[in-house]
Image (cartoon, grey):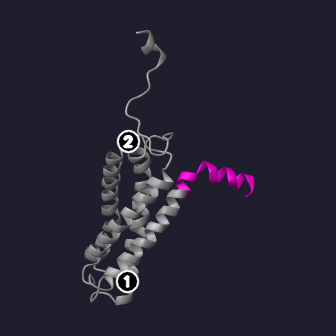
Amino acid sequence: MPEPLHALVLKHHELLKFAVVGGTAFLVDNAVFYGLKLTILEPKPVTAKIIAVLVATIVSYVLNREWSFRTRGGRERRHEAALFFLVSGVGLVLSSAPLWISRYVFLLETPDVSLVTQEIADFISAQIIGTLIAMVFRFWAFRKWVFPDEKAQPGSVRLVSPPDSTDEAA
């Protein structure tokens, strides 16, 4: 790998890993969304989207915890998982909102529009716009609140700060 590209990859390794995990979660999201939307939840696309995002979020947590943000931490695992799913819940709303707006505000659903138009609008609003909005929010929030400690060792939890030299003199 050329040196400038190698340096760029090293500098942004966390973002690149997050993008790979995001791509994997995107594939899971699409598979579940269309699997449900085209079968048992055909009349309820927003419900199909919510279920798909929930499944993708579980996959995302495991991959982000064990790979993307492996060197971050600083929290107990339960607290970290709770924050992850809280942030992901906000991401769920952000990713579902464009589909809801497309379907129920702009009325881009049959019989008001053709089936092709409905499916294109669903894909663009849910899978592209919603995913991008949620992805930007999640990356920022995960780094800020869920995995805040940049130098944590994998599996370690920082409970208290280490004493400084002035504490020993006291």
* Image position of 126 with respect to 144: above or below: below
Q: Residues within 10 Å of mark 2 (few under 14, many from 20)?
A: many
Amino acid on which disc 2 is placed: Arg
**Residue 98 in the image: x percent, y percent?**
34, 69
Q: Residues within 10 Å of mark 1 (few under 14, many from 20)?
A: some
The reply to whether the magenta stretch includes residue 49 is no
Look at mark 1 in the image and give the residue it sits on: 119
* Image position of 27 with respect to 155: above or below: below
Describe the element under mark 2 as helix, strand or loop: loop
Spatial separation of the CA atoms under disc 1 and disc 2: 42 Å
Look at mark 2 in the image and give the residue it sits on: 75
Describe the element under mark 1 as helix, strand or loop: helix
Q: Nearer the viewer, residue 79 or 88?
A: 79
* Image position of 168 with respect to 71: above or below: above
Which residue lies at the image location 53% right of the left edge and 57% below the top edge? 17
Residue 137: image quadrant is: bottom left
**Residue 28 in the image: x percent, y percent?**
42, 72
Residue furthest to the front in view is 155
Residue furthest to the right in view is 2
Magenta range is 1-16
**Residue 170 in the image: x percent, y percent?**
40, 9
Residue 59: image quadrant is: bottom left
